[in-house]
Image: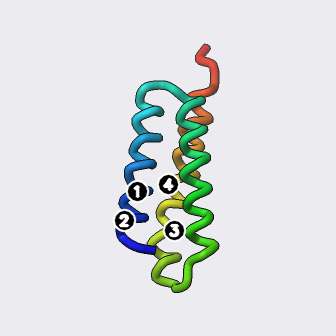
Amino acid sequence: MDANALGELKIKYQEVIDLIAQKKPMEAAMKLSEVTEKVNDLIDYATSDKELQALSPFQILSNHLQLKIDLLKLPLN
């Protein structure tokens, strides 16, 4: 895993955040699913603890963004 892969992840997560800000939960959920799958693949093929430590914050961010998307999907009363 190189710095380019981490940079790509950051860009993809920013796209998800932008979609959440635009109140587009369905698009955000699809984009988040793609980027989360990419993170999981990188974790599966990680060869060192350092790589796993670099990817751990992205897992946490995925979980947090999923909660935000779920809240956005709830109908407002």
**Towards the viewer: 5 or 36:** 5
Residue 8: mark? 1
Disc 4: which residue: 61
Q: Quadrant of residue 2?
A: bottom left
> What amino acid type is highlighted by mark number 3?
Ser
Q: What is the distance, in whole Å, between disc 2 and disc 4 at their CAs?
A: 19 Å
Q: How many marks?
A: 4
The front one of 61 and 12 is 12
In the image: residue 61, left or right of residue 75 = left
The residue at the point 47 percent across, 64 percent down is 57
Judge depth for marks 1 and 4 and give the one in front.
1
First in sequence: mark 4 vs mark 3: 3
| Dot 2 amino acid type | Asn
Q: Which label sits in the foreground, 2 or 3?
A: 2
Q: Amino acid at mark 1?
A: Glu
Instruction: Check disc 1: other Cα within 10 Å, few if <14, some if 14-19, many if 20+.
Output: few
User: In the image, is residue 34 above or below residue 49?
Assistant: above
Depicted 70 relative to depicted 39: above or below = above
Q: Alpha carbon of mark 1 to alpha carbon of mark 4: how far?
A: 15 Å
- Residue to which mark 3 is pinned: 56
Q: From mark 3 to mark 1, how far is it between C-alphas?
A: 16 Å
Q: Nearer the viewer, residue 55 or 66?
A: 55
> In the visual, does 74 lie left or right of 58?
right
Q: Are marks 4 and 3 in contact (CB under 8 Å)?
A: no
The residue sitting at 44% across, 48% down in the picture is 12
| Residue furthest bottom in the image | 48
Mark 1 and mark 2 in contact? Answer it, CB < 8 Å.
Answer: yes
- Label 4: state its secondary structure: helix
Q: Is residue 50 above or below residue 55?
A: below
